């Protein structure tokens, strides 16, 4: 009976590990998808800014449009999306148990004192180490 107890405990541990790993992978995939969607939205806003600027250029005298306020609205939306992307990137690094080199932006292991990509010394006050 001792054999079956050990087998049951090992099966439970394996199940828990697999569940945690699967959940983590699913969260990573969701974050990557959200980041890509937000990056696409930023690109669309850039295109809209370009269209508005061109329309303003072509129709400058015909239309009485405050182009600065129009552009400001787009810029605020872009800033908000970029903030979301940065939050998602930080959460993704945390899930991967990694940090980003502030010099070359390479993903590296948390315990590295120097970046293996650029050799830059990693300071203790890295944002991810505070989390």
Image (spheres, grey):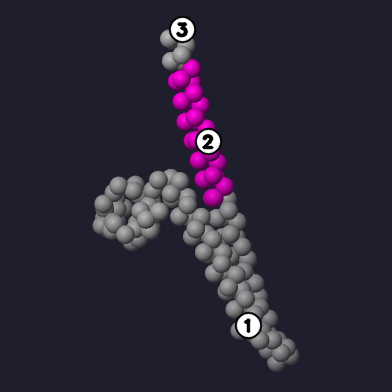
Q: Picture coordinates of residue 9 (x, y %)?
A: 46, 20
Q: Earlier in the sequence, mark 1 or mark 2?
A: 2
Instruction: Please tell me the numbered disc located at residue 22.
Output: 2
Q: Nearer the viewer, mark 2 or mark 3?
A: 3
Is residue 118 within the magenta segment?
no
Which of 47 and 113 lies nearest the eye of the viewer?
A: 113
The residue at which mark 3 appears reads as 1
- Marks 1/3: CA distance? 76 Å
Quarter of image, res 44: bottom right
Q: Earlier in the sequence, mark 2 or mark 3?
A: 3
Instruction: Please give the name of the residue rendered at 26% of the width and 52% of the height, measured from the top-left corner.
Output: 113
Crowd rating for badge 2 (residues with CA inside 10 Å; few <14, some 14–19, many 20+): few
> Mark 1 — residue?
69
- How many angstroms separate mark 2 from mark 3 (CA)? 31 Å
Vertical placement of 93 versus 66: above or below?
above
Q: Residue drawn at (45%, 46%), measured in percent from left and top? A: 95
SS at circle 3: loop
Please name which of the two marks, 1 or 3, marks the residue nearer to the observer. Answer: 3
2 left or right, relative to 124:
right
User: Which span of residues is magenta-colored?
Assistant: 8-32
Left or right of 9 on screen, residue 46: right
**Category of crowding for the residue at label 1, using alpha-carbon neighbours closer than 10 angstroms: few (below 14), some (14–19), many (at least 20):** few
């Amino acid at each position: 009976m001792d054999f079956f107890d050990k087998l049951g405990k090992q099966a439970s541990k394996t199940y828990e590990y697999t569940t945690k790993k699967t959940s983590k992978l699913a969260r990573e995939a969701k974050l990557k998808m959200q980041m890509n969607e937000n990056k696409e939205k930023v690109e669309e806003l850039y295109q809209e800014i370009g269209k508005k600027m061109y329309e303003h250029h072509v129709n400058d005298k015909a239309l009485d449009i405050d182009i600065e306020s129009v552009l400001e609205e787009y810029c605020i939306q872009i800033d908000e999306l970029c903030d979301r992307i940065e939050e998602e990137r930080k959460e993704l690094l945390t899930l991967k148990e990694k940090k980003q080199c502030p010099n070359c932006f390479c993903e590296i292991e948390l315990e590295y004192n120097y970046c293996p990509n650029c050799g830059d010394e990693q300071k203790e006050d890295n944002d991810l180490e505070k989390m």
